[in-house]
Image (cartoon, grey):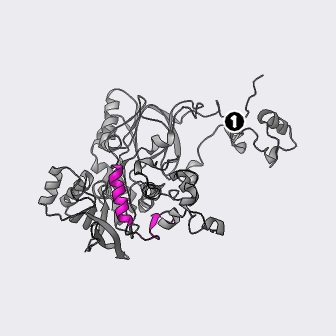
Amino acid sequence: MTAVDVHAIDGKLLPPDARFDVVVVGAGAAGTAAAIAAAAEGATVLLVDENPVRGDLIGTDVPLFYGGRMTAAVQQPARMIEQIVASNPALETAIEAGVDVRLGTAAWGLYVNGPAMRALPAPMLGIADAERATMIGFDRLVLATGARDLVLGFTGWDRPGVMGAQGFAALLTRYDALASRRVLIAGSGALALETALLALAHGIAVLGIVEVAEAVQGPSALAERVGAAGVPLFLGHTIVAADGGIDGVDRVTLAAVANKRQVEVYCDTLLLAIGAIPATELLEAAGVAPGETITRVGDCASVVRPDPAYLQAWSAAVGRHAPPETIVCQCEAVARADLIGVQPPRYLDRPVAMAARSLSSLLNDGPAHPDQIKRLTRAGMGVCQGRRCREQVACLLAEQQGVPLDRVPVATVRTPVRPVPLGVLADWQESAAMTAGWDVWFGIPTQWTPYAIIGTPEEAEHVSGLGGTMHV
C-alpha cells in the first residue's frame, strides 16, 4: 500500500483567478507594442505595469534608484497616471485594440511547474495593485520589464542626490517630476553618454563625466556629441565622496586614480551610469529560463551587464577612498566593516563570539556566497530587496577573496520580487484542503504534531500519515 501524505498540495491549489492567452509585464514601448501585436492576432491580452509607482516606494528606491531627487508631484496619483499615458500614447491604441491595461499593478511572482514544483493547475503570474493580489493564468508570458540601476558605494552615496541613470530617466521623461538641475555623471559607456545627452536636451547642466579608465568607454559617435556640447571629461578619476546639507548633495569630490589628486565639482545630483542590470527578477525567483512560453523583449532582453573586470575596476577605485563605516546596504545600515566582519545589523546585539567572526573565518570552509552573507548580515534583505547593494556585495566579496568578479555569484532573488503589503496578500483565496495542511509545513515527514489535535482521532492519522511522533 502506498503511503499518502495527507498534507501534500497536489490537487489542492485553486485555479488562477483569471486567464489570458498572453500576459505582458511592462507597458513601455516594447511591452505595449507586444500587447498590441498579440491582440491583433485575436489573443486575449493583459498588459500590467507597476507604474505609476507609489510615492513611498519611489522614496525607498523601488524599483529604480531614484535617489531622493523627485518633486512632490510623485505624491499625486492622478497626475502620475496622466503622465504615464502622456509619455506613451500607444497605451490608448492598446486599449482600443481590446488589451486589458492595468497600471499601478506590480507583477510580484511567477509560478511554473518544474523540477521543484509539479502541483500547479497552470502557469501563473502573481500581480497586485494597491487593494488586492490575484493569480493570472496564461498561455504565453512576455516580459518587458526593462533594466534596473547598478549602484556602487562610497562616502555619501546614500545622500539625496545620488541616483541611478534609470531612475533619472524615469523621473525626467515618464513622470516629469525631477528636481535636478546640475548633474555629474559616473561612467562613460553608452548609458552614461546617452544620459548626458538626455539631460542636455531637457536643459539640465552636465558638469562632467567621470571615468576610472583613461579613455571614454562608449561609442565614438555619442562621445563626439557629448564633447561638442562642452561637457568636461574626468578620465582616470574616481569618486571620493558626495557631500551636502539638508537638501542633499551639493558637491562631489573626485580623485585621480594615478596620483590621488582631488578636485571638487559643485552639483546637486550625481548620476550613477556605470552600467545597468536586466530586470529579470521574475525569472530568477521562479528558476526558469526564457523559451516558447516565456519570452523577453526590450531592455530586459537587450541590456548587457557591465563587463565584470570593468565593474571590479570601478569598485576597487571607489573602495580605496571608502572608510570602513561606508554604508553598503542602505536599508539595513550594513557598513563595509560589518560586511567584511560578517556582523549582524547594528540594531541587533553582537555577542563576543559573534564579534570575533570575520569573512576570513568563513573562507576557511570554502568560498563565501552572497546568499550566505545576506543571511548573516541582512545585507540585501531590506525593502529595496538588494537592488542597491547586490552588486556592491559581490564586488566586495571578490576583492576580499582575491578572485575575479565573474567567479562570485550575485545574491539570489526570492518571491515576492516587489514589496507587497501583507494586507494585500492576506485576501488571497485558498482552498479548505490547503488551509488544513499549513500548520505542519506541508506535512514534511517527522514534523511536529500540532497542539490542536493532541488527544483527538486526527493525531493518529497525523502519525500514521506523516510519521511524526513529537508534540508542540
Q: Which quadrant of the view contains residue 58?
A: bottom left
- Is residue 334 one of those drawn in magenta? yes
**The furthest residue to the top:** 1
Residue 278 shown left or right of residue 365 in the figure:
left
The answer to which of 95 and 33 lies nearer the viewer is 33
- Is residue 162 one of those drawn in magenta? no
The tally of labels here is: 1
Image height of 17 relative to 424, above or below = above
The answer to which of 73 and 369 lies nearer the viewer is 369
* Circle 1: residue type: Ala
**The furthest residue to the bottom:** 245
Q: Residues within 10 Å of mark 1 (few under 14, many from 20)?
A: some
**The furthest residue to the left:** 228
What stretch of residues is rendered in magenta? 307-335
Return the x and y of residue 470 as percentages of the image width and height.
82, 45
The answer to which of 333 and 172 lies nearer the viewer is 333
Q: Which quadrant of the view contains residue 236?
A: bottom left
Residue located 44% across and 47% down the image: 407
Residue 442 shown left or right of residue 14 in the figure:
right
Residue located 50% across and 43% down the image: 285
Return the x and y of residue 162 as percentages of the image width and height.
35, 65
For residue 178, say whether it is visible.
no
Return the x and y of residue 26 as percentages of the image width and height.
37, 43
Q: Give the SS element for disc 1.
A: helix
The quadrant the N terminus occupies is top right
Return the x and y of residue 57 as percentages of the image width and height.
44, 58
The residue identified by callout 1 is: 433
Residue 335 shown left or right of residue 193 in the figure:
right
For residue 252, say whether it is visible.
yes
